[in-house]
Image (spheres, rainbow, N blue to C red):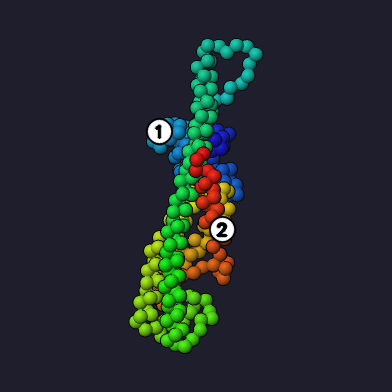
Amino acid sequence: MFELLSALASQSPQPVSKQSLHDILWPEIVVSDWSLSRLVSDTRQLLDDDGKDQKYIRTVKGIGFLMPEVVSIEPSSSLTPPSKMKPFLLVALLGLFIFSAASMYRYWSHQRLVQAASDIATYQAHTYTAFMAQLKRRNELVALLEKRLGITRQEQYEKFFVRYWPQMNKEERFVCSQSRSITNTGLAENNQKIHDVLEANPALFEHIEGTRELKQHLRFWLDKYHGVFINREDMCLLYSGVEDGVPYPSGVDEAVLTWLTQNSVK
């Protein structure tokens, strides 16, 4: 928040473009305009400035945001006349308020990250439960096909099931449908939730190792789910990993839990 106010104050009363603010606030992270809008909204709340009056931060449609003209205080060897004391005090009080608000914002931001990481850990636990349940269905289906057709699986699971889908009997297709239902609910829903939390909290990338790669992995998985899986009944499961160039980052689940343990009480 302090960086946002500093950026706007330095250009006051000229507007600062959204792209310039992105470059200043998140120089090494690609975030959406939603993150910037959320930061502006939170800053306005801390300054008791709603989106209608816009006393301190004004929206400039099609450009970005601006701060009304900032009055600078020049040093003087003489005593400050009483007539000038009021604006001086106002500026001083505003500075103190901004400093206090910045401290509050840092605390609030930290607590928000803790909550975000906690949500991710919960969704990861649900995903793991679903994955293990699907693992049983997968192995069961492989065993049924190998025994009935006298074959041995030697290719990736997705391709194996697609190849033998036309030859599956009712029992095998039922197991396949069970596996698909796990993908549609336990996996897809929780993967989407984890992705959304990471999208809304890019600061986690700098705090928890592997979360940036996790977001990339989930984005690919979700694209594959919506673009391919839901339209193909012969896909009994959906995997994305090393062969796609976006493997699930090793140790990221543990990294989330470790960071939570170290930060949740602060």
Secondary structure at badge 2 equals loop
Between residue 140 and residue 221, name the one nearer to us: 140
The x, y position of residue 140, in whole percent, is 43, 76
Where residue 69 appears, x then y in whole percent?
52, 29
Pointer 1: residues within 10 angstroms few (<14), some, or many (20+)?
Answer: few
As displayed, is residue 175 above or below residue 110? Answer: below
Residue 65 — which label?
none
Residue in view at x 49 percent, y 45 percent: 114
Q: Position of residue 68 (x, y in %)?
A: 50, 31
User: Which of the pair 172/229 is nearer the observer?
Assistant: 172
Total tally of numbered discs in the picture: 2
- Residue 145 appears in the rendering: yes
Report the mark closest to the observer, 2 or 1. Answer: 2
Decide which of 74, 112 is in the foreground and name it.
Answer: 112
Secondary structure found at label 1 = loop
Give above or below for 172 relative to 90. below
- The answer to which of marks 2 and 1 sits earlier in the sequence is 1
Distance Cα–Cα, label 2 vs label 1: 48 Å
The residue that label 1 is drawn on is: 53
What residue is rendered at 45% in x and 70% in y? 135
Q: Quadrant of residue 25?
A: top right
- Residue nearest the viewer, comparing 12 with 257: 257
Q: Of all residues shown, which one is farthest toward the bottom?
A: 150
Q: Is residue 164 left or right of residue 174?
A: right
Residue on which disc 2 sits:
251
Three-letter code for the amino acid on which mark 2 is drawn:
Gly
